[in-house]
Image: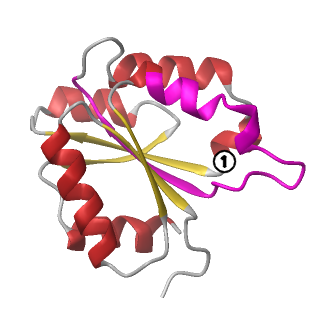
Amino acid sequence: MVAIKPKSILLIDDDKTTNFLNQLFIKQIGYDLKVNVVTNGEEAIDFLSNDELYNDEGSPFTPCLILLDTNMPIMDGWGFLAAFEEKFDQRIKDDIVIVMTSALNSQDEIAKALSDPNVKCCTQKPLSDIKIKKLIDDYF
């Protein structure tokens, strides 16, 4: 069992079917987690920038796991990572685990993602309840 379970998961993906399935998988693993869904990096930055999410003791939604798609309209995963690095202080970054997800299996894309200090790992889509549980067990 995890020592410190995440309080929430933020799904950042423009594919409605992927978001639906990921929510179903998260429910199946049996952890009591708040799941938030946005469809691009810009919406995710706006969500994370909401002052109501934060309090003096940290945040009611962290620790948090972010499952970040690479390819999305408006702001893709790479744009999100740049904005995340610029906008948020280290205290917030330390409480958030970002996992890049992609249907592509490009070694260049994986290397690029892993070179970002905020990305903990990359995983291939589609996800499953087993993959999501493993991510939680590995990082929390």
Which residue is depicted at the point 70% across and 43% down? Answer: 53
Judge left or right: residue 136 versus residue 58. Answer: left
Magenta stretch? 43-71
| Residue 65 colored in magenta in the image | yes
93 on left or right of 135: right
- Check residue 91 for magenta coloring: no
Question: Which sits in the foreground, 102 or 61?
Answer: 61
The quadrant in which residue 78 appears is top left
Q: How many numbered badges does the structure rendering display?
A: 1
Q: Is residue 2 above or below residue 33?
A: below
**Image vertical order of residue 73 relative to residue 116, above or below:** above
* View extreme (top): residue: 74
Q: On the image, numbered disc 1 is attached to which residue?
A: 94
Q: Residue at x 55, y 54 (%)?
A: 64
Give percent across and percent down for residue 108.
Answer: 19, 26
Say which residue appears at 46% left-offset and 30% top-offset: 116
Q: Secondary structure at mark 1?
A: helix
As displayed, is residue 56 above or below residue 49?
Answer: below
Question: Alpha-carbon neighbours of circle 1 within 10 Å: few (<14), some, or many (≥20)?
Answer: few
Q: Inspect the image, locate mark 1, and give the three-letter code of the amino acid beneath it.
A: Asp
Q: Nearer the viewer, residue 125 or 24?
A: 24
> At which x and y percent is residue 50?
67, 31
- Is 11 situated left or right of 123 in this image? right
Relative depth, front residue between 115 and 93 = 93
Please, which colouring scheme is shown? secondary structure
Residue farthest along the right direction in this orientation: 56
Q: Is residue 64 left or right of residue 75?
A: right
